[in-house]
Structures are given as C-alpha cells and as structure tokens.
Image: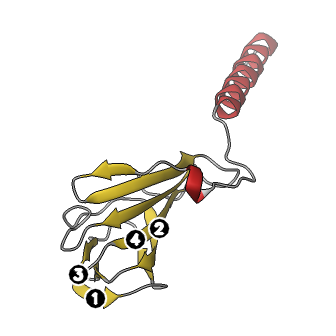
Amino acid sequence: MIHRRDIAVGVIALVATLGARAAVDEARTLIGPSIYDWTKITARKTEVGEVRFFFRGPTKTLEELEVHVTTLDPGKASHPPHKHPNEEMVIVGEGTVEALVDGEWKRVGPGSVIFNASNVVHGLRNVGRGPATYHVINWKSDRTPKE
C-alpha cells in the first residue's frame, strides 16, 4: 500500500533530480549567436599542416557543435580512414582533395561539400600541388549513437 509519505518522498526526489539536471545543463555554456573572426583564430601547426579551432560546445538543439579549419600540406592526409558516431560536413575552401566516400576515393576542389555519415568509414587527403584548406562542421544530438 502506498502512503502519502511515500508519494511526498517520491515527489521531493523527482523535483531534486530535475533541479540537479537543470543546474548541470545551465552550467554548460550554450553557444549562442556569435562571430568568429578568421584573423583572430590562431593557427596551430600539426605534422600534416595546421588547424584552427573555432568552437566546440552545446547549442540549444545540439549536444555538441564543433567547427575547425584544417590546412593540409601537399601529399598529406589528416589521419587514416576512420569512423565515428557523430555526423560531419566538410567544405573545401582551397586545393584539391580526395575524399573516401562509400568505399571509393573521389576527387573534389574548392566549393565542394563532403558529408560524412554516422559510423561510416571516411577519410580525406590532399592530392594537389599546394595546400588544401577545408572547414569541418560536426555535431552530436540526442539521436547520435553512443561510442
């Protein structure tokens, strides 16, 4: 038999849990309307070129949104082909790259957009004579599979 006291304890526990969850969510600063000036983002040298990190964090509708820009030296790859649960979009800004898409290497140039689906093997390499620069936008939502 459930007593009033049991109901009261349950309600108090529920309210405390929801309050704690709200406090944790609020503590994570949401990315809101913003401008990220290219000239103010420091390029960090890597073994294959350089990278500029713009931001990474939660938004109002996404658990995580991240943007960075990679510049690959000629003949270099960002990393070996791999897969991850989050989806990402790559926008080629300069140079010629080959992207591993659906098991096939495809060559594209400036203005091209590459979509890497969740948990599908993908890769990218610079096949041009000069640097290749591309913007990477990746995200995680409540529907993103867990790693």
The answer to whether mark 2 and mark 4 are in CB contact below 8 A is yes
How far is the residue under mark 2 from the one under mark 1? 18 Å
Q: Which residue is mark 3?
A: 127
Q: What SS does tag 3 mark? A: loop
The answer to whether mark 1 and mark 3 are in CB contact below 8 A is no
**Tag 4: Cα neighbours inside 10 Å, few (<14), some, or many (≥20)?**
many
Residue 79 seen:
yes
Nearest the eye: 146 or 10:
146
How far is the residue under mark 4 from the one under mark 1? 17 Å
Q: Name the amino acid type tagged 4.
A: Thr
Q: Name the amino acid type tagged 1.
A: Lys
How far is the residue under mark 2 from the one under mark 3? 17 Å
Q: What SS does tag 4 mark? A: strand
Q: Which residue is mark 4?
A: 133
Q: Which residue is mark 1?
A: 106
Q: Which is in the foreground here, disc 4 or disc 1?
A: 4
Q: Which residue is mark 2?
A: 135
